[in-house]
Image: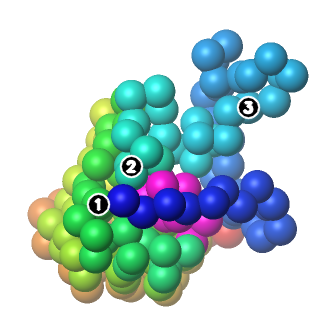
Amino acid sequence: MILLEADNSRDQSYGQNDSLDVDDSSVNDSGSMNEDRWYGADKGSSDEDKAMFIASRRGQAETVRLLLSQGISATSRNEQGVHPLQLAARDGHVQTVQALLQFAPWAVELSDCYGIIALDEAIDIGSLDTVAVLMSKGTFSNLYTLSERLVYAFELN
């Protein structure tokens, strides 16, 4: 069993996509959001999956590699179908994205319940390095739509 201590400090930027739809169940008694929920985990997530979600969202590539080497899934999902690769990509954590893809290259094609893939997340924040890593791993059957989306996203940034 792996024991990880939570680092409750938020001393690094988490990018532009930190907004989450928060319902009453994700807010604790003091009125602040449950940290697990903020990082992508939900009530049904195992401790191992929560650790993977948190490390992926924070961009802790070495922790992600350790978890993966211990057999923790790189493709676990929360209630919305979000997986660790999406969490790493939405904040441009290139090394974490690479670590996840090393263990689960097929995750590049996984979408959440809204049809969003990790590449969409990287495009939305304008992380060219993350986009390049993800593009090198996927087949992306609808490249015309993808190229339109890239142009639109980078015009906004």
Measure how far apart labels 3 and 2 are at the Cα level.
19 Å
* Few, some or many residues within 10 Å of mark 1 (<14, 14–19, 20+): some
In terms of image quadrants, where is residue 91? bottom right
Question: Identity of the amino acid at label 3?
Answer: Met
* Rendered residue at 38%/49% (across/down): 49
Q: Which residues are magenta?
A: 51-59
x, y percent for residue 64: 43, 72
Pair 3/2: label in front: 2
Looking at the rendered structure, the kind of residue marked 2 is Asp
Q: Is residue 128 visible?
A: yes
Q: Secondary structure at mark 2?
A: helix
Q: Residue furthest front?
A: 1
Can you identify the residue that label 2 sits on? 49
Amino acid at dot 1: Ile
- Residues at discs 2 and 1 in contact (Cβ within 8 Å): yes
Nearer to us in this view, 123 or 44? 44
In the picture, the disc for residue 72 is 1
**Residue shown at the point (76%, 67%) measured from the top left:** 13
Left or right placement of residue 155 versus residue 97 in this view: right
Report whether 62 appears left or right of 113.
right
Membership of 43 in magenta stretch? no
Decide if residue 151 is in sight here: no
Residue shown at 48%/32% (left/top)? Answer: 42
The mark that comes first in sequence, 2 or 1, is 2
Instruction: Tell me if residue 22 comes above or below residue 60 in the rendering.
Output: above
63 in relation to 78, above or below: below
Q: Is 61 on the left-hand or right-hand side of 31?
A: left
- Kindly identify which residue carries mark 3: 33
